[in-house]
Amino acid sequence: MAVLIYAESEKNLLKKSAFELASYGRAIADKKECDLIAVVFNLKDPSTLSEYGVNEVISFEDPTLSAFKAHEYGVHLTSTAQEMDVDLVVLSSSADAKYLAPILSVSLMAGYASNVVALPESYAPLTVNRTCYSNKAFNTTILNNEINIIGLSNNTFGAHKKSTPLNVKSGEISPSSGSFKIEKVEKVTGKVTIADADIVISGGRGLKGPENWHLIEDLADVLGAATACSKPVSDMGWRPHSEHVGQTGKPVATNLYIAVGVSGAIQHLAGINASKVKVVINNDPEAPFFKAADYGIVGDAFEVVPALIEKLKDLQNS
Amino acid sequence: MKILVCISNVPDTTSKINFIEGDKEFDRKGIQFIINPNDEFGLTRAIWFQQKQGANVTVVSVGNASCEPTLRKCLAIGADRAFRVDLEPSDGFQVAQQLQAHCQNENYNLIIAGRESIDYNGSMVPGMLSALLGLNFVTNCVALEITENKAQASREIDGGIETISCGLPLVIGAQKGLVEEKDLIIPNMRGIMQARQKPLKVIPPTTSETRSEVIHYEKPAPRGEVKLVEANNLDQLIDLLQNEAKVI
Ligand SMILES: Cc1cc2nc3c(=O)[nH]c(=O)nc-3n(C[C@H](O)[C@H](O)[C@H](O)COP(=O)(O)OP(=O)(O)OC[C@H]3O[C@@H](n4cnc5c(N)ncnc54)[C@H](O)[C@@H]3O)c2cc1C
Ligand SMILES: Nc1ncnc2c1ncn2[C@@H]1O[C@H](COP(=O)(O)O)[C@@H](O)[C@H]1O
């Protein structure tokens, strides 16, 4: 019996989600009194994982694995899980992890629950809580299989330090075959992504046009936040599709979500509801967002946002 | 080229969600059902391949008779034929197994499903189906071109885009971006009339297993009132975010 996590990294640095997964995995491993194993790919120094409760790292290093490939990463995770008698695999909710998990569930003959929001309710049978109906509801799901996979919603458990002695082994690379080839990876550099951000600033049609987006960007800059937008804003081409959040866009589960000039339609709220603290800035006191937010300002975005940026800058400089 | 589009029949995006039978079942009363939005983007791209490259487009849904109006709508949008696998599925794995059985008889070159359904939100079926069939798979697919027997696809990744080339057959998880909102096809009278003549075949399920069971549903606890801050008192907002919510 053992718990296995896939600890994601980028450019040789562990992602924030890796520490959250490790902490979650450690809590389960303590309950089950078993090992917590992390699989890493092309990560030179996995030692910080030991500060979050991982006691065994299987490290795969190979140039062919430098870009994420769901199928091949799946092959290596599967062989590790089988060799090490793993009965529970925990993955994050990143785009890559959600790509990988269903493939892994077939190769491991495992049950899979995505969007899990807390530690299991019980272990025999494994019972978990997940979101469904686009965050409009939760369900309790039983996974009654010899091996199971949990997809943990980001930012629901948090990272908690717990030092453990760590043993690092290198994994054996199995050669890949097939026609699947990654031609190109284009990433915006120097910008916080919606998936990794602690704070997201979102703009809606109330901003009137793309020329006003400096308000959203400047506010995001002072707070170290990612930028997002409502669906019509991306449909009209004011902002790229990748910023569209909501039921049919990207899901958001951050610590702080600030919506500026967004009305708060049910489809918008469905995708961002999992965020912990919500702030709305809107000049219409009747806007539905005020029913979903924790803090609200009834006011004109073109006055409130610049003033807020100034105040936050002053605060940082003091 | 033979294309299959997997259609999930889901509550309209504006639906208020309720549960019955001691919170064990979804309450379908008064709910309008629609094509899962991600599947609609996929279907629209399939119809593009039909019109521009002569593809044949089949749609399939695993479900009881209540999903037939949604399949008819797909036919009215332009699909050539429809199948309904007569089983009310209980999890994504079961759906994937039913679809696998159907695909094994049909030799599709391209199988399109949605990135995720908006009811179970599992993001399970396309990946499981690709693995069960041993086919290439690209999810979060925001662009797809097919020339001869090769596909070029783009996948949205956290913070960027990845371009992939691979051979067919291929399974994709579709999402917005694959086509634009304005490209979505609203069925016209002619399409609706033609759809009535097109084949919608009900096929019996094969044996399949489930790997998970939902035992209970719950709605989020009602939230407290919003705290309003005056627009000319931003210091208070900053104070609340720093000291009460502790998020900045
Ligand atoms: C199938 C389907 C799926 C959908 N999926 C999504 C989704 O995933 N995400 C999504 O966002 N939407 C989605 N929608 C669209 C959704 O229904 C709304 O139309 C959309 O969210 C509205 O966007 P908005 O709030 O930017 O614009 P509006 O509704 O036009 O709201 C603009 C707001 O700005 C305020 N405002 C105006 N001027 C100012 C000012 N000077 N200062 C401050 N505030 C101002 C107004 O009071 C108003 O509340 C979907 C719709 C459908 C049918
Ligand atoms: N019952 C079903 N019948 C046919 N296709 C389905 C069904 N359920 C899910 N799918 C397909 O799988 C995709 C992802 O669904 P899910 O795994 O539930 O998030 C959907 O967008 C559909 O394309």
Image: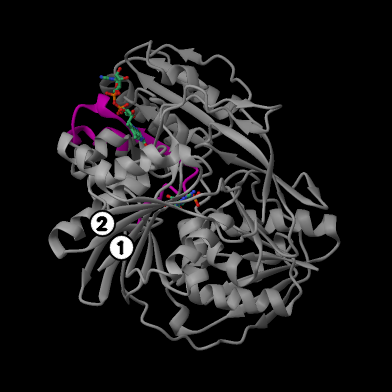
The residue depicted at 64 percent of the width and 38 percent of the height is: A139
Q: Which residue is mark 2?
A: B46
The residue depicted at 32 percent of the width and 34 percent of the height is: A230
Local crowd at mark 1 within 10 Å, few (<14), some, or many (≥20)? many
Relative to A162, is B225 on the left or the right? left
- Mark 1: secondary structure: strand
Q: Which mark is residue A83?
A: none
Relative to B125, is B219 on the left or the right? right
The residue depicted at 57 percent of the width and 80 percent of the height is: A60
From this view, report whether residue B222 is shown above or below residue A232.
above
**As shown in the figure, which amino acid type bears the numbered disc 1?**
Ile
Local crowd at mark 2 within 10 Å, few (<14), some, or many (≥20)? many
Image quadrant assignment for residue A8: bottom right
Q: Are marks 2 and 1 in contact (CB under 8 Å)?
A: yes
Q: Which residue is mark 1?
A: B3
From this view, report whether residue A60 is shown above or below residue A54.
below
Q: Earlier along the polypeptide chain: callout 2 or callout 1?
A: 1
User: Residue B194, how many percent across, how many down?
Assistant: 20, 43
Pick the front one: B231 or A69: A69
State which region is magenta.
Answer: A189-216
The verdict on residue A67 being magenta is no
Q: Residue furthest left?
A: B52
The verdict on residue A198 being magenta is yes
Q: How is the image coloured?
A: one colour
Relative to A304, is A113 on the left or the right? right
Q: Are the numbered discs 2 and 1 placed on the same chain, yes or no?
A: yes
User: Residue A146, how many percent across, how many down?
Assistant: 75, 64
User: Residue B170, how many percent across, how many down?
Assistant: 36, 69
